[in-house]
Amino acid sequence: MEMKPIERNNAACAVIQGSDIVISDPQSALDLLVTAQYEAGTRNIVIDKGLVAEDFFVLSTGLAGEILQKYINYRARIAIFGDFSHYTSKPLHDFIYESNRGRDVFFVSTEDEAVEMLTR
């Protein structure tokens, strides 16, 4: 895993890059948050959906809810970017829609959009 700090509009975020799954359970998500806070001085995380366990996108597992609740509790924000169009779950599409209307969790197409959401 590699972390690239980016600052725009006086706001910082940590862009997570790599080829292995980084978020697979609540503990790994918290470890990532602590690392971003320590190394990049931010609680704003930008991550490719390919670095997030596929179970996260199956809402019935409860993984997304558990991880995102922890991020909210720690006043962290996350933007996950990638292609979500192949998911057929209506609850997931509704969850993504509602998340994007908020201020803390975003699902977007590109890394640039993700950075923009967290630094606007």
Image (tube, grey):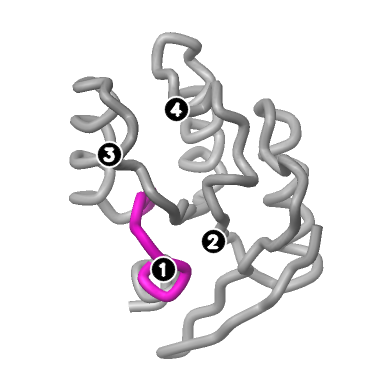
Q: How many discs appear?
A: 4
Look at the image and give the residue range highlighted in magenta: 104-113
Q: Residue 96: which quarter of the image?
A: top left
Residue 120: x %, y % from top left: 33, 78
Report the mark closest to the observer, 4 or 1.
Answer: 4
| Mark 4, residue position | 57
Are dots 2 and 3 in contact, CB under 8 Å?
Answer: no
Name the amino acid, label 2: Val
Q: Earlier in the sequence, mark 4 or mark 1?
A: 4
Disc 2 residue crowd, few under 14, some 14–19, many 20+, Cα 10 Å: many
| Mark 2, residue position | 46
Report the mark closest to the observer, 2 or 4.
Answer: 4
Residue at the front extreme?
A: 86
- Image vertical order of residue 57 relative to residue 13, above or below: above
Q: Secondary structure at mark 4?
A: helix
Q: Earlier in the sequence, mark 2 or mark 4?
A: 2
Q: Secondary structure at mark 1?
A: helix
- Image vertical order of residue 118 relative to residue 49, above or below: below
Q: Earlier in the sequence, mark 2 or mark 1?
A: 2
Residue in the picture at 33% in, 35% down: 86
The span from disc 3 to disc 4 (Cα, nearest Å) is 10 Å
Q: Residue 89: which quarter of the image?
A: top left
Q: Which mark is residue 96?
A: 3
Q: Secondary structure at mark 3?
A: helix
Q: Quadrant of the N terminus?
A: bottom right
| Mark 1, residue position | 118
Are dots 2 and 1 in contact, CB under 8 Å?
Answer: yes
Residue 13: x %, y % from top left: 56, 72
The span from disc 4 to disc 1 (Cα, nearest Å) is 21 Å
Q: Secondary structure at mark 2?
A: strand
Q: Is residue 45 magenta?
A: no
Name the amino acid, label 1: Leu
